[in-house]
Amino acid sequence: MSTRIFVDANILFSAAYTEGSRVVLLFDLARASGAIVCASPFVIEEARRNLLLKRPDALGRLEALVEGVRVVPDRMALASGSSHGLPSKDVAVLAAAVAAGATMLVTGDRAHFGRLYGRVVEGLRVATVADALRFLMELGGS
């Protein structure tokens, strides 16, 4: 099974918001290394909604990114029932990543996921963009 990297709305938003950012590099390295980038409909819709409010001209870039993303089903709860201290919308993100069989959840949400950065939670590593880039380069995407 290929390496799967689940991205949250913040990552999709950031990649669409600024062309040429290092967040875009995450998608390029994933493709080059054979990793599959995943997101749920909830995550994609949140990124779309935020771009519509803050930078509607970037919606086309988001749609182009989403074309290369494997859309996996939303999940509202974790099998273990543990929320890891996350708000319910973030539990849904974590649950979707787990259900997708992701190796890593990449998030820029320091407020809610920051204390989980670098930890393995529910079988996947919670990572920053920088962590994910290092991982993908080691995987062979350089």
Image (tube, grey):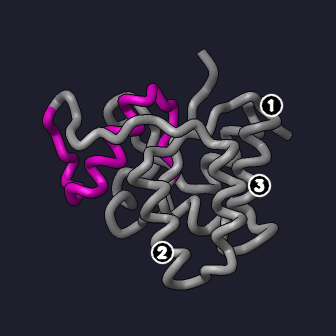
Give the residue type that dot 3 points to: Leu
Q: Is residue 135 left or right of residue 39?
A: right
Residue 97 drawn in magenta:
yes
- Report the label total: 3
Front position in the image: 62 or 86: 62
Q: Earlier in the sequence, mark 3 or mark 1?
A: 3
Please report the residue visible at 54 percent of the width from the left and 84 percent of the height from the top: 54
Q: Is residue 78 left or right of residue 52?
A: left
Q: What is the magenta range?
A: 81-106
Characterize the local packing of mark 1: few (<14), some (14-19) or many (20 or more) Cα atoms within 10 angstroms: few
Residue at the bottom extreme of this rendering: 54
Report x, y in % for residue 34: 74, 28
Give the residue type that dot 2 points to: Asn
Please report the residue visible at 45 percent of the width from the left and 60 percent of the height from the top: 45
User: Which residue bears the numbered disc 1?
Assistant: 140
Report x, y in % for residue 37: 61, 39
Front position in the image: 61 or 105: 61
**Kind of element beneath mark 1:** helix
User: Which residue bears the numbered disc 3?
Assistant: 25
Q: Which mark is residue 50?
A: 2
Disc 2/disc 1 C-alpha distance (Å): 33 Å
State which quadrant residue 29 falls in: top right
State which quadrant residue 94 falls in: top left
Give the residue type that dot 1 points to: Gly
Report x, y in % for residue 135: 66, 39
Report x, y in % for residue 124: 43, 33
Q: Do callouts 2 and 1 mark residues in contact (Cβ within 8 Å)?
A: no
Please report the residue visible at 43 percent of the width from the left and 52 percent of the height from the top: 117
**Kind of element beneath mark 2:** helix
